[in-house]
Image (cartoon, rainbow, N blue to C red):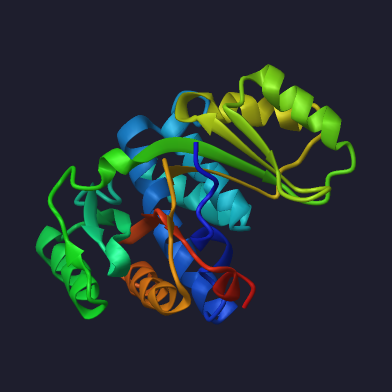
Amino acid sequence: MAGHSKWSNIKHRKAGQDARRSKIFTKIIRELTVSARDGGGNIDDNPALRAVVEKAKTAQMPKDTIERAIARGAGGKEGSELVSLTYEGYGPGGIAVFVETMTDNRNRTVSEIRHAFTKAQGNLGTDGSVAYLFDKRGIIEFDSVKEVDDLMEIAIEAGAEDVTLEDDESLTIITLAEDFLRVKDLLEGSGFEPSSAALTMLPQTLTDLDVETGEKVFRLLEMLEDIDDVTGVHTNANFPQELVSV
């Protein structure tokens, strides 16, 4: 299993945090509403909804905002036209890009996504063109952990697929999608609170990029994330350290 894409660590480096957070909240509210619409508003009976709730908590969304979005979706009136769609394509340097969306207008969404790929000198592919390069996995991250050995042991015993020590105190734990919430609960129950936890599409291998190509890919990913209908962007790009450390 390849390491977590560095895109997750640098994608907000140029963005105004307040504006970015507002856009992130808008997208998560959509996901909460649709998940509650499709599976009910009880997170104990709706694993998909609970996963989005965890995503909302990681983004520091207020509790009342989360509850209102769930209530609207569970009421069956909100998000009735929204559907989840994925798009696949190639960016500069031939890197794979997997895009998750939630939309009420397929034509608008595909047009905006195709425009972003074209403008960035990439191309939108067909279904299945890059999806096979990614696996759905849970990513649980911890910063500044003092009892590193204890955390690693608990994670492994809980069924984590991989545990990576990033430095002396930071860990990244990878789980199968179906094990994500169970492993997270066990870790929290043992007194370890993650800094972030989410389901994602994890690349099986990473493609190394030079600085020039990395900048072009970065612009493509930013353009895609700025599209209102896009809820997730995943890539197998391995950005050079010069970009990661900016």
Q: How many labels does the image show?
A: 0
Q: In this view, does 52 lie to the left or right of 169?
A: left
Residue 147: x and y in percent read 88, 36
> In the figure, is residue 103 to the left or right of 207?
left
Frontmost residue, 58 versus 175: 175
Residue 18, visible in the rendered structure: yes
| Residue found farthest to the left | 107
Residue at figure coordinates x 76%, y 23% from the top left: 154
Quarter of the image holding residue 139? top right
The quadrant the C terminus occupies is bottom right
Q: In this view, does 15 lie above or below 142?
A: below
Q: Give the residue drawn at x 64%, y 73%.
A: 245
Camera-nearest residue between 117 and 92:
92
Residue 156 is drawn in which quadrant? top right
- Residue at 54% in and 46% down: 3
Residues 74 and 181: in front is 181
Q: Is residue 50 above or below residue 220?
A: above
Question: Horizontal and vertical percent for residue 41?
Answer: 44, 35
Any part of residue 83 in sight: no
Taking depth in this image into account, of 71 and 117 the one nearest to the observer is 117
Q: For the point 22% across and 80% down, which residue is it?
A: 119
Q: Give the percent coordinates (x, y) of residue 127.
A: 15, 46
Q: Where is residue 187 in the image (x, y as percent from the top left)?
A: 73, 29
